[in-house]
Image (cartoon, helix red, strand yellow):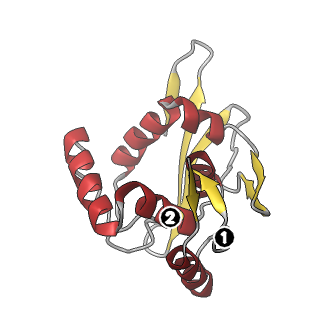
Amino acid sequence: ESVVVTDEDFAAYQSLVFAGARTVPVTVGSRWTEREMIAASLLSASNNHADMLVRWAFGGQAEYLEAAEAWLVEQGFDGTAVADASGLKGESVSTADDLVRIGRLAAADPLLASLLGSDGIGAVNGASITNTTRYEPAGSATTVSRSYTDAAAVTVVLSMTTASGETLTA
């Protein structure tokens, strides 16, 4: 299934560009698959694609925030609060412990793990989806997340597999 970029999606993209946030270009009427939107959000840190995913999967921010809060409680992520899909709002916060636990979940997911270990997925609708979040302090580490906010500065979550096959996330 593909998602068609709406006028609302394009307006949100333009607002994020104006605000200086990370985005991947979209045009009204272009089509994106769920995998492509996840790749843009995860690898290229595309805030507009995070918002598009929320509108597509949940119908809107309010529904997403309700589902996210329920999931955080269910998983026991007591140090994490979600205020928006992109994480740009200052009320979106987490602890190092929660980020590591979330990183482990992401690294264990086959789709996310394959994307995280890639250079990107190439061009989609003329937009390049490359792994701009990659940070490699050691050759065997995979970046699960590298992000920046004014409140937290740069945050990096890394995953690596040891010689014995154990996956470590920090």
| Residue denoted by label 2 | 52
Quick check: 37 above or below 104?
A: below
Image spot of residue 106 (x, y percent):
48, 38
> Answer yes or no: do the residues labelled 1 and 2 have beta carbons within 8 Å?
yes
| Position of residue 23 in the picture relative to residue 54 (left or right) | right
Residue drawn at (38%, 39%) of the image = 101
Q: Secondary structure at mark 2?
A: helix
> Relative to the observer, which residue lies in front, 118 or 91?
118
Residue 89 shown left or right of residue 129 in the figure: left
Q: Which residue is mark 1?
A: 26
Q: Dot 1: what SS?
A: loop
Viewer-side residue, 120 vs 25 = 25
Q: Nearer the viewer, residue 119 or 67?
A: 67
Residue placed at 32% from the left, 59% from the top? 64
Residue, x 25% and y 39% (percent of image)? 75
Q: Is residue 141 visible?
A: yes
Q: Amino acid at mark 1?
A: Val
Q: Position of residue 84 (x, y in %)?
A: 37, 67
Residue 159 visible here: no
Quarter of the figure with residue 144? top right
- Around disc 1, counting alpha carbons within 10 Å, would you say few (fewer than 14), some (14 to 19), or many (20 or more)? many
Identity of the residue furthest to the top in this view: 164
